[in-house]
Image (cartoon, rainbow, N blue to C red):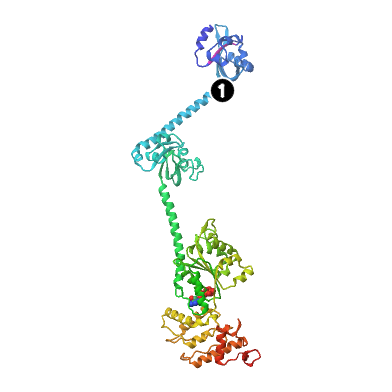
Amino acid sequence: MPSTLQSLIGNLPEAIVIIDPVRDRFICANNLACELFGRTDTDLMQRPVSSNFRNSLPQLCVFTEALLHRGVGMMQEISAVRACGKELELEVNGSAFTLEGNDQLVTFCMRDKSWYRQWREHSNAQHHHRSGLLHWQRMHQVFENIERENQLILSAAGEGIYGVDADGCATFVNPAAERLLGWKAEDLIGHNIHTAIHHTHPDGSDYCVGDCPIMAAFKDGAVRQVDDEVFWRKDGKPIPVEYTSTPILDNGHLVGAVVLFRDVSERKIAEVKLRSALEEVERLKHKLELENAYLQEEISESYNFHHIIGRSHPIQQIIKQIQLVAPTVATVLITGESGTGKELIARAIHHGCDRNSRPLVRVNCAAIPRDLFESEFFGHIRGAFSGALNDRLGRFEVADGGTLFLDEVGELPLELQGKLLRVLQDGEFERVGESTTRSVDVRVIAATNKNLKQKVTDGLFREDLYFRLNVFPIHSVPLRERLDDIPLLTTHFLKKICQRFHKPELKISLAQAQRLQSHNWPGNIRELENLIERQVILSRGDKLRLEAPTATNHQPEPLAAPQEHDLVTEQDCRSLRHRAITGALRQTGGKIYGPDGAARIMGIKPTTLASRMRKLGIQRDQFTPNSSLSR
Ligand SMILES: Nc1ncnc2c1ncn2[C@@H]1O[C@H](COP(=O)(O)OP(=O)(O)OP(=O)(O)O)[C@@H](O)[C@H]1O
């Protein structure tokens, strides 16, 4: 009988045993059941059933009882012990039946619960896989359709075009993309395209796929246009690209994107060139504007240019010094009172050197606000300080190759003097806000009406800078020390000013000239020039009206009122000269020589004064403090 039962259960696909519950013995077991317990059929038959369920005996008894009582049943929590000692969680379906009238037997159909669990997971996975595969196939169908329907366009297009599925894998790659990227289509298709060609930013940093606009398009379905990224070729070289990523929808679901890109290397190179060309144009334009401003200034100064008028000994000395120093590159320091012609000397030096095709750039150090000095001298870059809206060239750069005229150099703030010294010594400087060191080739001519030496002593001017500037000193003599030049200067100014005002040229009479010579001219040549200009404006016809210059402390005596016909007789001359000399002697208490003597006040040599006094019969001692004439 057992062999009949054995043949019945032998090939069933579940582990099945038939048990005699009264005797606690297996009647038969199929192969799967033997495998489940890890025993041979013989071994199993020799052992009590309960020994195989020793850890779940109560459950076994209750379950068997229930089967005998109800006929069928199911037990989900029962554990069996395999031959190796390992426990198995079983799920058992059972049934009871009676064999040949008496013996009540039960059948256990057993399932290993952990195996079932695994199997279910596997089956779920397979299910997912199958449905994923279907989705994938569908997606591919979409891309295949795109590829097939647009085959001609894809092959002919000059732009690179590739498809990418929702997992980021390439689905097709057109020939232009193959050429541009150096990859074969088959190397890319099915592989993550971001990892292959889009993995790194232009600066070499990692390009996280989460930041990729192409991938982002899968989430929001938006078209992305990007033009400042690179794709990486197979040979490791980056190509600057502009690309458009267009998401693909299938039945309302995002299934991927088509990316169209073009190599913009040449455009980028052209852009860089254009940008630097525009910057260069802007720089040159700015430089030209500045130069132009200086040249305009030059033109307006052209009347005076080179026109150093005078035959006096001091002016001849100055002209010799100019001729000597002009052709060199030596720094020149011109000292002298205001209005004595320091700038004229500087221009004459520049004109006489081989830099004269470049501008002479003048900086009036007294006119620059303190906090703008550095920027004015060395320039600044945009944003260097509030209000610096653009890059700006400094005067040193504008004067490159030419001459920089530092007027009123004594007014330079101490903190800038060191920087000036550096550029004088090394020709190097930095723009404000920039660390790049720039070089210039500039000749410097400085001028001051201050006593620089005294400033050095007072600690207001760096001694090293003073010596650096004072390589070749020229002293511009005040007009009162070269009164002999007054007639020439007056004639020169008359001509120049009459031309400017389109007036017929006016002449100055000897008497007028002598009257001018008896003035002290604290404002020097500028004062004379201004006076002449005023008189030209006031004059009518071809006669020069000549009013007395503004009175000064040193003025010996008010000048005579203008003669009605401007004709000066010899007698007029004698009396004018007499009055001038007596006035000067009265002022100096009869002193002729020395810095506070009458000769100096009149701007003539003491010997000349003494000779004139002799001719006019003027006695010096008439003016000494005790004399009545001195009052
Ligand atoms: N020797 C000269 N011959 C002709 N004109 C002269 C002479 N010297 C000075 N001038 C004229 O006098 C005016 C003042 O000269 P300039 O500006 O050169 O003096 P400065 O010493 O530089 O004055 P400041 O110290 O005030 O800048 C100018 O118009 C200049 O052309």
Number of numbered tags placed on the structure image: 1
| Residue 381 visible, this angle | no
- Crowding at dot 1, Cα within 10 Å, few <14 / some 14-19 / many 20+, comes out as few
Nearer to us in this view, 157 or 603: 603
Residue at 51 percent across and 42 percent down: it is 206
Q: Position of residue 553 (x, y in %)?
A: 59, 83
From the viewer's perspective, tell me whether residue 155 is left or right of residue 517. Answer: left
Quadrant hosting residue 28: top right
Q: Does 549 appear above or below 222?
A: below
From the viewer's perspective, tell me whether residue 222 is left or right of residue 92. Answer: left
Secondary element type, mark 1: helix
User: What kind of residue is marked 1?
Assistant: Ser
Q: Position of residue 300 (x, y in %)?
A: 45, 73
Residue 344 belongs to the span the image colors magenta: no
Q: Position of residue 161 (x, y in %)?
A: 39, 41
Residue extending furthest right?
Answer: 626
Nearer to us in this view, 627 or 563: 627
| Residue 525 visible, this angle | yes
Q: Does 28 appear above or below 313?
A: above
Identify the magenta region.
15-20
Q: Position of residue 108 (x, y in %)?
A: 56, 15
- What secondary structure is the stretch in magenta mostly built from? strand
Quadrant hosting residue 613: bottom right
The residue where tag 1 is placed is: 114
